[in-house]
Image (spheres, rainbow, N blue to C red):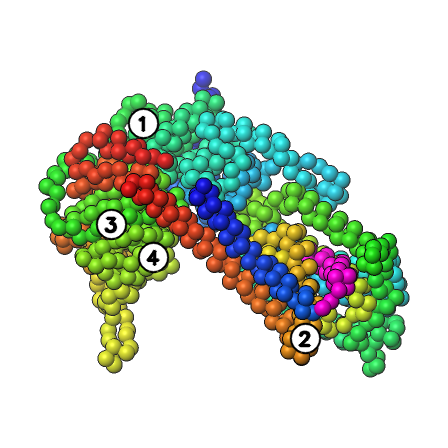
Amino acid sequence: MSDHVPLLEMKKVAKDFFGNQVLKDINLKLEAGEVLGLVGENGAGKSTLMKILFGMTEINETGGYDGEVLFNGKVLHFTSPFDALAEGIGMVHQEFSLIPGFTATENILLNREPQKKSVVSEVFGERLNTLDRKSMKQKADGAIDKMGMHIDGNMVIADMPVGHKQFTEIARELSKEQLKLLILDEPTAVLTEQEAEVLLQSIRGMASRGIAVIFITHRLHEIMSVCDKVVVMRDGVLVHDVAAKDTSIPEVTRWMVGRSVNIDAQTHRKPPETPTIMSIRKLWVDMPGETVRNVSLDIREGEILGIGGLAGQGKLGIPNGIMGLYNAGGQVTFDGKEIPLNAPRRCLDSQLAFVSEDRRGVGLLLDESLEWNIAFPAMQIHNKFLKNYLGGLIKWRDEKAIGEVTRKYIEELQIKCTSSKQKAKQLSGGNQQKVCLAKAFALNPKFLFVSEPTRGIDVGAKALVLEALKKFNRENGVTVVMISSELEELRQICDRIAIVSGGRIAGILPATSSSEDFGTLMVSKVV
Amino acid sequence: MNKKQNNASGRLLNFLGENSVPIMFVIIVAICIPISGFSPKFLLNEIITRMGRNVFLILSLLIPIMAGMGLNFGMTLGAMAGEIALIFVSDWQIWGIPGIILAMILSIPISVVMGIMCGKILNASKGREMITSYIISFFTNGLYQLLVLYMMGSIIPIIHSSIKLPRGYGIRQTVGLLNMRQSLDNLLALRIAGVKIPVLTFIIIALMCLVIVWFRRTKLGQDMRAVGQDMEVARDAGIDVERTRIISIVISTVLAGFGMIIYLQNMGDMATYSAHSQIGMFCIAALLVGGASVDRASIGNVFLGVVLFHLMFILAPTAGAKITGDTMIGEYFRVFISYGVITVALVMYETKKRKAKAGMGHLLEAAQREEEKANA
């Protein structure tokens, strides 16, 4: 079969943004019903490649791309995602694209609703057709069945847990009859382990129906369990394209970073037996999707305490509640003084700092320079980087000191940027995370909450961030509480790990305990 | 048992909080009725008349709210279109029902043009639709004056001098619609125990309500709801957001034009330069009194609002005069209330979200306390 045409073929695809080469010489083939795992560090060019394939307008606006993309043997010339959709390419983006007040059914069939004609619509045009609710339900249920995960078609999106929103998105793509290729961009990032397993199942189901899937994720074991082939990208180049069965997680990791990452060679120090610095009593936090109920917890001075648990069980609510970002109640004593809740400023005044999991929303001033981002809280809270005139009546920013401290952190944390004046929104996810850390470090806190510091960033940046946290703890004696969904990284740097389940502390174990022990705690009180 | 009671009282509190504005007005009206000394028959008569007069205008506000464009202060544009149409019709001396129908037909192209203009401007100022539409209504008032005060009679032929200013061009302060007065209301009118019911007007209103209910089920209505909740998502799904928003404003403007014609045929004369000036304000105030908010309004809100708002209008001057001996106090009270209720609604739109959050917290706290009791 020499004339066999693959479903998707990329030939010498390259792309530059105004002279900055982000993709070089990408050659790729994908057959119908195949699952391709696409891995690579942040900034390796995965997103750009998918944007080309999906016809995103920003590719055209920046001068198109070089090379050829063939779909079913036909050269593609997409000018917008709608062209891609018409050809049968669907994509589930990292951010949800759902109407909050609509039901799952309405969202699945958004703008593709089955309609009934009437006299009025014959006269005034198709948009006055009435919706055919009955066949809408049938179609949506069909798509949900295809997916294999049951979600309630009549449930309003705003009332759904985050995993179900993700499944609604996938069902929407599946409801498109012409779908031949589905791109999933980190779909499991927001899912619990059980939900992720269901998703992997449904990917297998899609493949058996002849739909090709491109699956992007940082969780390599998912790639190994579901993909037929693995494509590894690094610095805009496709470095490896192999069958999944011929490779292994350590090998793929090595290809991704181009160096070997050894996560097991971690030496643990003995947990410090220091006095309690923060004691939390009867804390409740109303954070949507991360409710905390009746948590009591003592944190020792100078330790790194990990808080782990499955998504949606409330681990994120603890720091967000204490720092005053969500409505909370209970008592928190820090360094002998009670900290008022629901008052972020008072927390910061007591030398607490918080690196939020919501980098783009809470963590950064996206439209401002790195200098501003790093120095702003220190300026605001501790009057640092200010020059006083007229006995403090007039305060001017000390631009020189700001520049200096920013450059220091850029170097220390290896933030990839063009200059310290670059805008925060232009950085990649991993580098934004480093800026958030620098910002907290610049506050010189006694106590640091770090929430999901490695979410959505690549292996290389991850190691750097963890190392920076550890160094900050060891050298400055700062107490660190790190919240993360990834048990392995907690075990790398923490002294003790508290597991949250069902909004409560299920137990606290030393980091050296076995994975099984942690796993049992995680599911112990799940609600 | 205790929990159940807690739940019930919680729900009651919730209901009171959600509907605080209409409840406040019910209380004011309940206090004012005995003080004013009006007979129930008189009040009923007045309310029914005013409902027929006003409901259609307020219905025109519903569709932009559905499309997420807030309270359409730009409905004034439709009112102007209706007035321009009425000026022509009365100049051509076409009276009665045919005159009203002709005026409605004439108002459509004017409303559509103004609605497209307004919609385009609002598309350029997304997120600030309300203040923009409010200012557009002032700006368009200038265009209206230019047209009516200078161009009518000079460039645009006006035959009858009775509606022209003595100087030969421009329209008089008031245009009499005596030959049209209540012709819609009187056709098929019923009198039950001395209360006059304008059956035809009510039929038109009922039809309009049905049209709105039907509209919500159309593809266009669904698109509007989608656009109203998240423009970006709607755009990604291939809905033409800009066009959908313009259509919603055009529909609102056209309906406001019809509403103004119904309103003026009931009044029987038209204050050429001021009839429209506060109509948007009063309609919006009435809708809000009925319990609507910036992002949510129903047909029920329209009817409740009209009844409460107008009852207060009827009662306040008399009640005010009885209490203070000064009739002006009631007049003052009306305007004060209209502006006040709009301000309250705008503030509540934001605080409601925060309140909802705090409510969840209380539930959590209560659950925790109960748990401790159970443990002890």
On screen, B178 above or below B247? Answer: below
**Other-residue count near label 4 (Cα within 10 Å), few / some / many at <14 / 14–19 / ≥20:** some
> Mark 2 falls within which chain?
B
- Label 3 chain ID: A
Residue depicted at x 47% and y 29%: A150
Q: Is residue B39 magenta?
A: yes
The residue where tag 3 is placed is: A280
Residue highlighted by disc 1: A224
Q: Earlier in the sequence, mark 1 or mark 3?
A: 1
Q: Amino acid at mark 1?
A: Met
- Which residues are the magenta region? B37-59
Q: Are marks 1 and 3 in contact (CB under 8 Å)?
A: no
Closest to the observer, A164 or A10: A164
Q: Is residue B118 left or right of residue B268?
A: left
- Amino acid carrying label 2: it is Lys
Label 2 Cα neighbours within 10 Å, binned few <14 / some 14-19 / many ≥20: some
Residue A4 visible in the shown view: yes
> CA separation, marks 1 and 4?
44 Å
Query: Which mark lies nearer to you, 3 or 2?
Result: 2
Instruction: Tell me, for residue B322, which label it has, or none.
Output: 2
Q: Nearer the viewer, mark 1 or mark 2?
A: 2
Q: Please identify the quarter of the rendering in which residue A307 is found.
A: top left
Query: How far across and down, in percent of the image, does residue A483 sit?
Result: 27, 44
Q: Quadrant of the N terminus of chain A?
A: top left
**In the displayed structure, would residue A142 be above or below residue B27?**
above
Name which residue lies at 36% across and 48% down.
B365
Task: Judge the density around disc 3: few (<14), some (14-19), many (≥20) Cα neighbours within 10 Å.
Answer: many
Residue A37 lies left or right of residue A255; in this view the side is right
Q: Secondary structure at mark 4?
A: loop
Dot 3 and dot 2 within a common chain:
no
What chain does mark 4 sit on? A
Kind of element beneath mark 1:
helix
